[in-house]
Amino acid sequence: MTRKKIEHKKTLNKVNLKGFKVTDVDRKKLIGIASSSLEDIIIKGSKKLNIKSGGEVTVHLNDGTHVDSEEYFDTLPSQTVLIFKKPGENIITGADLIYNVLKHANIDVLRAAGQVQQFFDDKIKEKLRVLSSVVENLEESSDRTLCSSREEDPDWFAGLETNAKTKESFMFRRSQDRIRGYLYKSQSDLKKNPEVLNNASVLKVVEVSFSAFKDLLRKDAYFGCYLDRSETGAMCNKEGEFACAGVWKNGKCLYEGRRMHLINPYSSREARIIFSTWNLDHCIERSRTILPSLLWASKEVALTCNKQQAVNNSYFYNLLFTAANLRLVHIVCHDKGKHDTANCDKDKLIVPL
């Protein structure tokens, strides 16, 4: 390779570099690293964090989402915090993060720092109810809910690693991140399935489906609208208040009888932090129901060599990513048990060609 070509390659690599911040599961130190690929940042991050080479390391986002492909890595914005996890370790929980942040927010109810960790360790859902009531009191006294820009409400942006200039643009991106997480997690889960991994025909059908999903998501801007109060498709009102949709089988939030869970993450930094514990929950479950159905449909289509029928990608797209099957729920109303009566429509899994 000539010197000119080498210099050109170095220039291209510099152009593709993005800055990230890496840490381990203890989050005691945060280190800045410039990298152009997932493989590269694992090598550099492991060295900076003194993780022995050769150890199996996985990379995760703050909410625990596994960054398991170069494609997913490429979508991450600059300054994203990446957590390096070794086998047997656990990502710090949302409760721990809320504790650490709110402890420094000087909220009176959380000043007894020595007892707060124990407070979080037991019955986390009950404790988050208490935190929600604290936030409600803060919201009542706040006059910055309708402020939008960083200049108008700088406290709201405190502690955020973001270039967003408005609350709405930040929430838009957070909504996109949640949907991207579902996309890449679903794709990864299916491709790791032995029935896909060991069958080229089935793998090809699966790849066609996820290619279609990505095209549709790009057109729908990865549903950033869900959490952005300025968007038509927002799951909140114009002021930014979100109402819990309740446990999947109830159809509505039954918290304390008639009073439902409500929160406005636009009102304060504390409300924004607690809102991160709310879930976009699939009524028809993603892992237990949707993906097995998508696998079945892919195998059926593979048997006909894609000539007589096709996977109904539109149907699966709606189930995985749209409000037709997604419900925003408070952690108390997030039922992680089996949704045994919420099933896919077998007549809609495949369409004839």
Image (tube, helix red, strand yellow):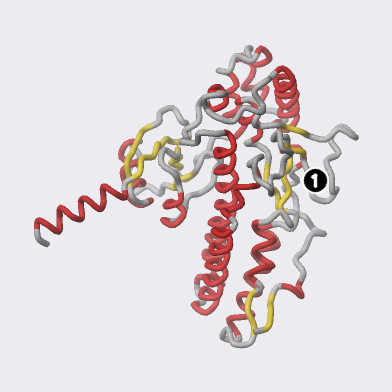
Instruction: Name the residue located 54 percent from the left edge and 64 percent from the top edge.
Output: 215
Instruction: Name the residue located 75 percent from the left edge and 66 percent from the top edge.
Output: 344
Percent from the top left, x then y, of residue 129?
75, 28
Label 1 SS: loop
**Residue 267 is drawn in which quadrant?**
top right
Q: Is residue 169 left or right of residue 38?
A: right
Q: Where 98 sits versus 103, above or below?
A: below
Q: Is residue 78 left or right of residue 351?
A: left
**Residue 209 is drawn in which quadrant?**
bottom right
Q: Where 35 sits versus 145, above or below?
A: below
Instruction: Name the residue located 73 percent from the left edge and 37 percent from the top edge.
Output: 242
Pick the residue in front: 224 or 133. Answer: 224
Q: Where 349 sits versus 115, above or below?
A: below
Pick the residue in front: 267 or 21. Answer: 267
Residue 53 visible in the snapshot: no
Outermost residue on the left side: it is 3
Residue 57 visible in the snapshot: yes
Outermost residue on the right side: it is 257
Percent from the top left, x then y, of residue 276?
62, 36
Q: Is residue 193 left or right of residue 23?
A: right
Q: What is the three-letter code of the residue carrying label 1?
A: Val
Instruction: Name the residue located 70 percent from the left edge and 28 percent from the top edge.
Output: 122
Q: On the rendered image, what quadrant is the N terminus found in?
A: bottom left
Which residue carries the number 1 mark? Answer: 247
Percent from the top left, x then y, of residue 143?
68, 20
Percent from the top left, x then y, of residue 125?
73, 33
**Residue 8 is drawn in which quadrant?**
bottom left
**Circle 1 residues within 10 Å: few <14, some 14–19, many ≥20:** many
